[in-house]
Amino acid sequence: MTNSELIKTLSLRLDLSQSEIKRLLKGSIDSIKEILDEDTGVSIPGFGTFVTYVKKKRKSFNPYHKKFMMLPPKRVTKYRPSSSLKQELKFKRLKND
């Protein structure tokens, strides 16, 4: 599903204009980005949790130059779905089979 499809779907479900939904979605995503930038996690009940952590520097092989190189540490975001979401998706998948 693309961003525009999501906006159209939410607009129909919530009976709001697409411009209002677009503004709400952008605001929500910006807020989540700011919270993750502060190294605190975001928990959305019924959906899941977003957390950031730092990957340590590590050794990697570059096949083009045929040499090992050190990759610097970097911050990454991790998503963990809630148990209720996992159960719901598992049940729907089994029901459709």
Image (tube, grey):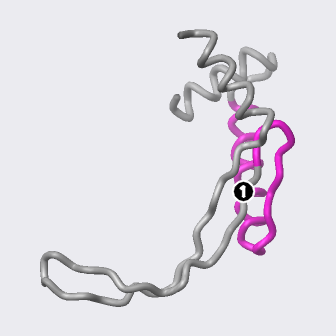
Q: Which residues are magenta?
A: 19-48
Identify the residue at image location x=62%, y=63%. Answer: 77
Q: Is residue 15 above or below residue 82?
A: above
Total number of numbered labels? 1
Residue 62 on image: x %, y %: 22, 79
Question: Label 1 crowding class (10 Å Cα cut-off): few <14, some 14-19, many 20+?
Answer: some
Q: Give the amino acid at mark 1.
A: Phe
User: Where, by quadrant of the figure, is residue 41 drawn?
Assistant: bottom right
Magenta: main secondary structure:
helix
User: Where, by quadrant of the figure, is residue 36 drawn?
Assistant: bottom right
Check if residue 87 falls in the magenta segment.
no
Front one among 11 and 81 = 81
Q: Is residue 89 above or below residue 82?
A: above
Identify the residue at image location x=56%, y=78%. Answer: 55
Residue farthest along the right direction in this orientation: 45
Residue 21 on image: x %, y %: 73, 32
Residue farthest along the top direction in this orientation: 96
Identify the residue at image location x=71%, y=24%. Answer: 10
Check if residue 31 falls in the magenta segment.
yes
Q: Is residue 69 above or below residue 92?
A: below
Q: Is residue 84 above or below residue 48?
A: above
* Residue that label 1 marks: 50
6 left or right of 69?
A: right
93 left or right of 59?
A: right
